[in-house]
Amino acid sequence: MKALLNFSVSVLYYVCFGFLLSFFHVIQWIGFYIIGKKAQKAAVDVLNFFLLKCLLIVGSKISFQNPFILPKDRSIIFVANHQSTYDVPPIIWHFRNHNAKFVSKKELGKGIPSISFNLRHGGSVLIDRKNQKKALKDIEIFGKDLARKKHSAVIFPEGTRSRDGVVKPFHKSGLLILMKNMPDAVIVPLSIGNSWKFAFNNYFPMPLGVSLRVTVHKPMEIIEGSHEALINIIEKKIVDEVNRLQNNI
């Protein structure tokens, strides 16, 4: 009976999920090509609000802890651990006023309604992980553009998602490039807990009652000459908090 309920609720969830992606793909297209980029971004923001609400169908609870007032007049580099696709909607929605753009793998730039369109046209950078030299150059250009516009970046330094919730060692190169090319930005570490459970069965059936938790850490200034040391501090903060989030369900 429980398996049947899980299957039925998952089907209902994906009907809702698929409708949202398809509907807002059209809205984004209209916004980008007819109204303008601001309209396309607004569509993305609203889409991610509804994607979070859609998780209520599977009984998920979302806790987003941010006791800090983040600056809106300068760039921010959001540094987060990565557990699943569901890491992204709370970041987009809760930081919608900071024009956050993602460092993402190029494979996500096609084939996914709404998501691929936003990654291609919304200001994010799509990198080829098999070509590190070009990937780092693309991140450099991306960072300089964000610094000029005072927009923000989101990067997952693990490089790929954790399938069991254990934070993987950080690959520092991309973050170092961003810090070098966005020297006036502030660093905001993010710890994400329990998101990996959504992907445990390759996203189907969806698990019921997952408590998705995000903790925003205190903003940190970039100090010239101390980039690697700062990354080590960021990594430890994220790891310690992820462990706490997942041990206190």
Image (cartoon, rainbow, N blue to C red):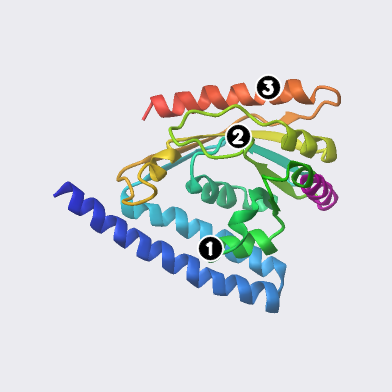
What separation in Å lies between label 1 and label 2 (alpha carbons)? 23 Å
What separation in Å lies between label 3 and label 1 (alpha carbons)? 34 Å
Q: Amino acid at mark 3?
A: Asn
Label 2's element? loop
Label 3's element? helix
Is 28 within the magenta?
A: no
- Between marks 3 and 2 in the image, the one whose residue lies nearer the viewer: 2
Q: Can see residue 70?
A: no
Residue furthest left as drawn: 1
Going by the image, does 126 lie left or right of 55?
right
Q: Amino acid at mark 1?
A: Ile
Q: Which residue is mark 1?
A: 112
Give the number of callouts.
3
Q: Magenta region: which residues? A: 137-149
Q: Is residue 2 above or below residue 211?
A: below
Q: Is residue 125 above or below residue 79?
A: below
Q: Position of residue 65 (x, y in %)?
A: 52, 36
Marker disc for residue 158: 2
Label 1's element? loop
